[in-house]
Image (cartoon, rainbow, N blue to C red):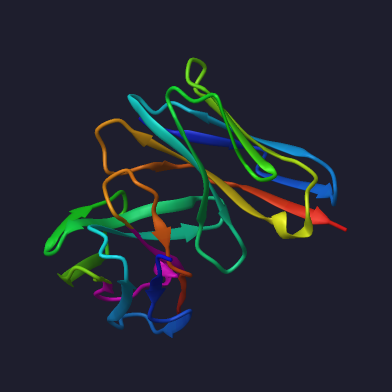
Amino acid sequence: DVKVTQSSRYLVKRTGEKVFLECVQDMDHENMFWYRQDPGLGLRLIYFSYDVKMKEKGDIPEGYSVSREKKERFSLILESASTNQTSMYLCASSLWPGEEQYFGPGTRLTVT
Amino acid sequence: KNQVEQSPQSLIILEGKNCTLQCNYTVSPFSNLRWYKQDTGRGPVSLTIMTFSENTKSNGRYTATLDADTKQSSLHITASQLSDSASYICVVLPGGSYIPTFGRGTSLIVHP
């Protein structure tokens, strides 16, 4: 079974803090994705990576950056957290482009 | 712009009843369409994938249909169970793209 794990289920941070969200997959997948999910808006792509050290902006990259030093690990970084970044963050991976994406359980981030 | 619209936004049914969820898309060119199920507090999980040449595909009590001419898909749930309570997300992959377009989901509640 593919397993995608995220470092925290719940996280509370203060405005201006630097926040790291970690994602690890154990199936040697090439592609990894970060989404945020908000009520009524569905999933929106923040960044994706199709290879180690390769990354591409998604639909809403502003305020975020990513790091992929190893194939199995994809990190989302909020350089200076703001209240409008309070959301559910979901990580996903897939073997090939367009293949089924396997999602982690999500991290619910609250910025106060 | 590629879009995926789902209806209804939410649905409440009694256990044992059938229901049908709708997905209309404007994505072009088309590669495939997936239905995902997302339980509360969890990441989405793929239920089924439809390619251009497929009209109907079943996965247990879930049956997906695709009309590529009218760009519509439906997900029919037979003999609903309490465990079917979840959000159902329609996801369309454009041809030649890594990045799928997500619908906002239909929230289904099954009451005993």
State the residue at coordinates (51%, 57%). B44
Image-based side of B47 in relation to A45, left or right? right
- Residue B103 location in percent, x, y? 50, 42
- Residue B13 location in percent, x, y? 82, 47
- Residue A9 location in percent, x, y? 48, 79
- Picture quadrant of residue B39: bottom right
State the residue at coordinates (72%, 60%). B83
The reply to whether the magenta stretch includes residue A79 is yes
On the rendered image, what quadrant is the C terminus of chain A found in?
bottom left
- Residue A55 location in percent, x, y? 17, 58
State the residue at coordinates (56%, 29%). B73
Image-based side of B1 in relation to A75, left or right? right
Q: Is residue B67 above or below residue B32?
A: above
Residue sitting farthest toward the top: B69
In the image, A57 versus B80, the foreground residue is B80
- Picture quadrant of residue B28: top left
What is the number of callouts on the image? Answer: 0
Q: Is residue B17 above or below residue A88?
A: above
Q: Is residue B62 above or below residue A56?
A: above
- Picture quadrant of residue B109: bottom right
Report whether residue A61 is seen.
no
Report whether residue B16 is seen.
yes
The reply to whether the magenta stretch includes residue A96 is no
On the rendered image, what quadrant is the N terminus of chain A found in?
bottom left
In the image, A60 versus A91, the foreground residue is A91
Q: Which residues make up the magenta segment? A: A76-93
Q: Is residue B28 above or below residue A83?
A: above
State the residue at coordinates (47%, 59%). A37
